[in-house]
Structure formats: structure tokens, C-alpha cells
Image (cartoon, rainbow, N blue to C red):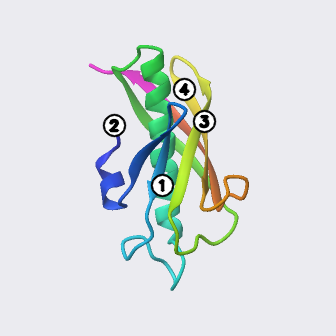
Amino acid sequence: MLPPYAGLLGITLELDEGAPVLAMPFGTDVIGRPGFVHGGALAGLLEMAAVAALKHALAAEARTGTRIKPVNVTVDFMRGGREKITRAQGHVSRLGTRIANVETIAWQDDRDRPVAAARLNFLLAVAD
């Protein structure tokens, strides 16, 4: 269900009441400055969470043959991610026939204290 890039970050899939939540462990593959998660790794986690949420929503509508292409990504970094597991979850705010909008948050200990958030727009195309 996840793109190969998720494997490079060590991302695993968890479920929260049926909705996908992604978990990224802290390690040498995602380290930025000493003791902190690299911003690019956080952005990658947020994008993968958006992809997982969108694929989950498309499957719920029996639109599994739909290709998704990211059009725009905006990431807000709120605080430094420390040496802990970082989780992220996406929420599809609009699922149209050609465009989808997804909002994601990443957190460590407390979901109400996110370390980063993102808004992504996707182009939807029927697979050939």
C-alpha cells in the first residue's frame, strides 16, 4: 500500500480505528542535526501519510484503479522532532473526481502537540 520511499525511512503502517497511521522510528537514516529528526524525513513521512489516507479513501469508494499524482505540498514545521518514534496521519478534506486535498499531522508523544503538519493537493487520474 505504501510507496517504496516509505521503506527507506523505515515507515510502518498502523491502524487507528481502521484509518492508517504511519510510524517512523528515529535512527541514522532520519537524523538531521544531532538528536533531531531531519526536516526532509518529516516531510516525507507527512507525504506518505497523505498517500496512505488518500488510498484508503479511494478504496472505500471502490476507486482502487485511480492513479494519484502530487501537485502541491506545503509543510509547516512546528517544533523539533526528537529521538523518538514519530507518527503521522492524514485526513482527506476533499475527494473530487479529478482533485483531492489532504491534511496531515505528525506527532511524537502527544497527538495534540504536532511536530509538523502539511497540506497536499493531488491530481486523480483513472489508470489506463
Q: Which residues are magenta?
A: 123-128
First along the sequence among labels 1 and 3: 1
Q: Nearer the viewer, mark 4 or mark 1?
A: 1
The answer for how far apart the CA atoms under marks 1 and 3 are is 14 Å
Disc 3 marks which residue?
91
Q: Is residue 89 above or below residue 97?
A: below
Q: Which quarter of the rendered picture does the C terminus lie within?
A: top left
Q: Nearer the viewer, mark 3 or mark 4?
A: 3
First along the sequence among labels 3 and 2: 2
Q: Quadrant of residue 103?
A: top right
Q: What element does badge 1 sit on?
A: helix
Question: Are discs 1 and 3 less than 8 Å apart at CB?
Answer: no
Question: Which numbered dot is residue 1?
Answer: 2
> Looking at numbered disc 2 in the image, what kind of residue is underneath it?
Met
> Looking at numbered disc 3 in the image, what kind of residue is underneath it?
His
Along the viewing direction, whichever of 109 and 24 lies nearer the viewer = 109
Magenta run includes residue 34 = no
The answer for how far apart the CA atoms under marks 3 and 2 are is 17 Å
Q: Residues within 10 Å of mark 3 (few under 14, many from 20)?
A: some
Task: Identify the main secondary structure in magenta.
Answer: strand
Say whether residue 70 is visible: no
Determine the residue positioned at 57% across, 19% down: 96
